[in-house]
Image (tube, rainbow, N blue to C red):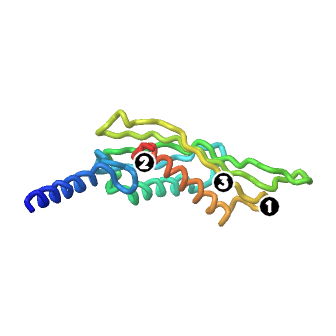
Amino acid sequence: MKIFKILTLFILLLSINSCSVYNFTGTGKIDAKTFQVNYFQNNADLIEPGIERTFTIELQEIIQNQTNLNLTSSNGDLLYEGEITDFRITPMTATSDQTASQNRLTIRINVRFSNKNKESDNFEKSFSFFHDYDGSKQLVGSTLSEALDVIFERITQDIFNESLAKW
């Protein structure tokens, strides 16, 4: 009976200890308590007003939703900063009358990540993704919103994975 109690206690301690090494988001143990996301400027040749604010907020939200880090406006243990460097619309397929039947919106964002507690994690990298939409539609309203949702969801997840999940 005493051996059973010791074995049960050992398994319990082992399982509790292992929870600090990995969590469900894949971030493992983060050596930080706070993070800061500076405003991402829009330096693309083609400017779409407001996307820099939308992107900055979406990056803040993915980190808040997938970690227990606290957002701060200054002196964060983790710092994300950068700029939108490309916002490009490209015709993808043509019709018989030489008009685009499908267009592609591509957005590229340059990110600088700094970890005060582990400088070997620091990086500067460009992330991009695209969304195809019907060539007969203008890139405004719900078409633009859908494209930005798809693109920003992918880019923010890629940034999260590169900086915290190490995938």
Name which residue lies at 12% across and 60% down.
5
Few, some or many residues within 10 Å of mark 2 (<14, 14–19, 20+): some
> What crowding class fits label 1: few (fewer than 14 Cα within 10 Å), some (14-19), or many (20 or more)?
few
Judge left or right: residue 163 versus residue 148.
left
Q: CA distance from mark 2 to mark 1?
A: 37 Å
Amino acid type, label 1: Ser
In this view, the mark in front (2 or 1): 1
* Quarter of the rendering occupied by the C terminus: top left
Residue 38 tag number: 2
Q: CA distance from mark 2 to mark 3?
A: 25 Å
Residue 110: tell me if it is visible: yes
Label 2 or label 3, whichever lies nearer to me, is 3
The label nearer to you, 1 versus 3, is 3
Q: Earlier in the sequence, mark 2 or mark 3?
A: 2
Q: Position of residue 21 (x, y in %)?
A: 29, 49
Q: Amino acid at mark 2?
A: Asn
Of pointers 1 and 3, the one earlier in the residue sequence: 3
Q: Residue furthest front?
A: 1
The single residue placed furthest to the bottom in the displayed view is 142
- Place residue 86 in its image quadrant: top right
First reached walking from the N terminus: tag 2 or tag 1 = 2
Image location (x, y in percent) of residue 84: 56, 45
Q: Is residue 34 above or below residue 1?
A: above
Element class at badge 3: strand
Residue 4 occupies quadrant: bottom left
Q: Determine if residue 75 is in view.
A: no
Residue beneath disc 3: 131
The answer to whether marks 1 and 3 mark residues whose Cβ atoms lie closer than 8 Å is no
Q: Alpha-carbon distance for marks 1 and 3?
A: 15 Å
Residue found at the far right of this picture: 97
Residue placed most toward the observer, 10 or 111: 10
Residue type highlighted by circle 3 = His
